[in-house]
């Protein structure tokens, strides 16, 4: 890795595929279960299981970037809003996901709504974050002697 904060290709793929798979399976379950769009696959237990596994992998992917990518982005003052917004929504998603599985039944309906609304907002922010070029181009920390 030649630039501080730039992920190696394996890690970038892991993060992208992890987040995309989690998002797609979550959307499929949302459409079939919450919005009752009738289709053979939407909203089934199999889709929910796939979403849970994808969420675990996406959490591992997030953990793989916490130590350097986020620190480098913070130091560069680059993409702060989308970066920290993602972290905030991911925290809500992880906590609400855990509450859906382990939480009390009386808060379940509110947690379901919180989880899918946060998920949709996260997808939008994640897309903006990866599609937006850095202020200083792809080399946002290259050549900066402070880092």
Image (cartoon, grey):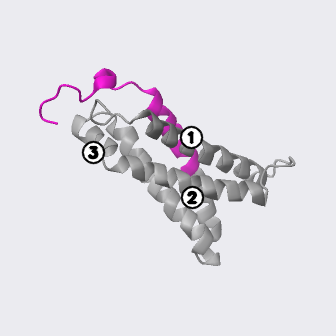
- Note whether 136 is above or below 92 in the view shown: above
Give x and y (percent) for residue 18.
Answer: 55, 45
Q: Give the range drawn in magenta.
A: 118-147
- Note whether 88 is above or below 133 in the view shown: below
Q: Residue at x 57, y 63 (%)?
A: 97
Q: Which of pointers 1 and 2 lies earlier in the amino acid sequence? A: 1
Q: Which of 32 and 5 is in front in this view?
A: 5
Give x and y (percent) for residue 139.
Answer: 29, 24
Q: Is residue 135 visible?
A: no
- Note whether 108 is above or below 51 in the view shown: below
Q: Which of pointers 2 and 3 lies earlier in the amino acid sequence? A: 3
Which residue position holds label 3? 71
Left or right: residue 33 compared with residue 126: right
Identify the image quadrant of residue 91. Answer: bottom left
Q: Which of pointers 3 and 1 lies earlier in the amino acid sequence? A: 1
Left or right: residue 43 compared with residue 87: right
Which residue position holds label 1? 17
Q: What element carries label 1?
A: helix
Q: Is mark 3 on a helix, strand or loop?
A: helix
Q: Residue at x 44, y 50 (%)?
A: 62
């Amino acid at each position: 890795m030649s630039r501080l904060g730039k992920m190696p290709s394996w890690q970038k793929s892991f993060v992208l595929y992890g987040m995309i798979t989690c998002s797609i399976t979550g959307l499929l379950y949302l459409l079939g279960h919450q919005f009752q769009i009738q289709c053979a696959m939407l909203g089934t237990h199999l889709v929910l299981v796939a979403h849970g596994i994808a969420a675990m992998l996406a959490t591992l992917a997030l953990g793989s970037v916490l130590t350097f990518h986020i620190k480098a982005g913070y130091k560069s003052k680059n993409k702060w809003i989308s970066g920290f917004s993602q972290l905030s929504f991911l925290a809500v998603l992880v906590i609400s996901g855990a509450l859906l599985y382990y939480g009390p039944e009386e808060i379940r309906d509110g947690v379901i709504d919180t989880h899918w609304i946060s998920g949709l907002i996260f997808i939008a922010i994640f897309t903006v974050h990866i599609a937006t070029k850095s202020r200083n181009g792809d080399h946002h920390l290259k050549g900066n002697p402070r880092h």
